[in-house]
Amino acid sequence: MVMAEPLLAVRGLSVAYAGVPAVRGIDLDVARGEVVALVGANGAGKTTILSAISGTVGFGGGRIGAGRVLLEGQDVTGRPAHRLVALGLSHVPEGREILARLTVAENLDLGAYQRSDRAAVAADVEVVYERFPILGQRRHQLAGSLSGGEQQMLAISRGLLGRPRLLLLDEPSLGLAPQAVRAVFEEVDRIRRAGTTVLLVEQNARQALALADRGYVLETGSIVLAGTGAELSRNERVIDAYLGLPPELGANAAG
Ligand code: ATP
């Protein structure tokens, strides 16, 4: 049988900041239709991997020292972010990065800046407002007035307005109240059912692995474990390092 080509393949990727290695020769695949979770502690290199994939790592002073990023087999390593957007990649960065001084509607519009099908964009925006009525009610208000959970839904919805084939989500549950965390994971599940492939970075390993089809565990820039979400959730090393904490000791154990 011929193996189908993954939507995203990362091969031997190394990234350094001012010569200091942050990611050390990692390999990672995401197949069409999957949710793949990348979990690991603070500073393990998760954000660096996503930004290397999306062409934004240079903005933070990072440099790809080795390796390749392949989108449907096409080598896109080091391409500028806007060209990757045009190829179907959408990156929702950590901290949401919604533009607080723009309205909800203006933020959503930014997500569709490369589309010329304005009628279809308007229809997609209406779907967002139906899905998240609070965003519809506040469409003309500044995005900065939304709660953290609402801002995250806005950021994800904005990412989807580019109609990506691959959505990169960086810590979407970070800093949110438990109910908003649940809503974020439900939204990721809905996105998968709607047919969009997701690479999800999370410190909230328990919920990320419960949702993901497959996962990778990253420690100090290297992938130390890979498997299905279920396998990793049962893995003793993962339980000890990421799932065993009582809730009061951190977001890892939330939920
Ligand atoms: P977090 O969850 O805290 O964001 P992470 O797993 O996403 O962690 P990265 O942010 O990718 O990890 O950081 C990986 C390593 O690279 C860390 O040692 C970090 O200090 C370093 N690093 C990240 N960004 C920069 C930067 N802009 N300049 C210098 N070093 C950086």
Image (cartoon, grey):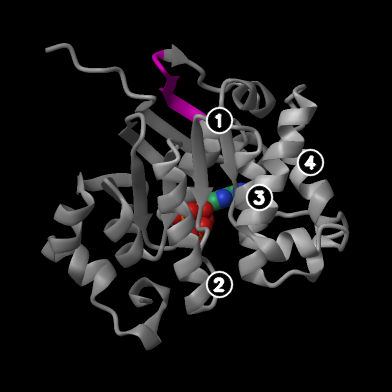
Q: Could you say whether the residue bearing mark 1 is in a helix, strand or loop?
A: strand
Mark-to-mark CA distance, 4 and 1: 17 Å
Q: Residue furthest bottom?
A: 248
Look at mark 1 in the image and give the residue it sits on.
89
Q: Is mark 1 within 8 Å of ligand 1?
A: no
Stretch of the chain drawn in magenta:
64-73
In the rendered image, residue 71 lying in the magenta stretch gets the answer: yes
Mark 3 or 4, closer to the camera: 3
The residue pinned by badge 2 equals: 175
Residue at 59% across / 47% down in the picture?
A: 92
Q: Which mark is residue 109?
A: 4
Q: Nearer the viewer, residue 163 or 251?
A: 163
Q: Earlier in the sequence, mark 2 or mark 4?
A: 4
Tag nearer the camera, 4 or 1: 4
Which residue occupies the foreground of this view, 142 or 223? 142
| Cα separation between marks 2 and 4 | 26 Å
* Residue 248 occupies quadrant: bottom left
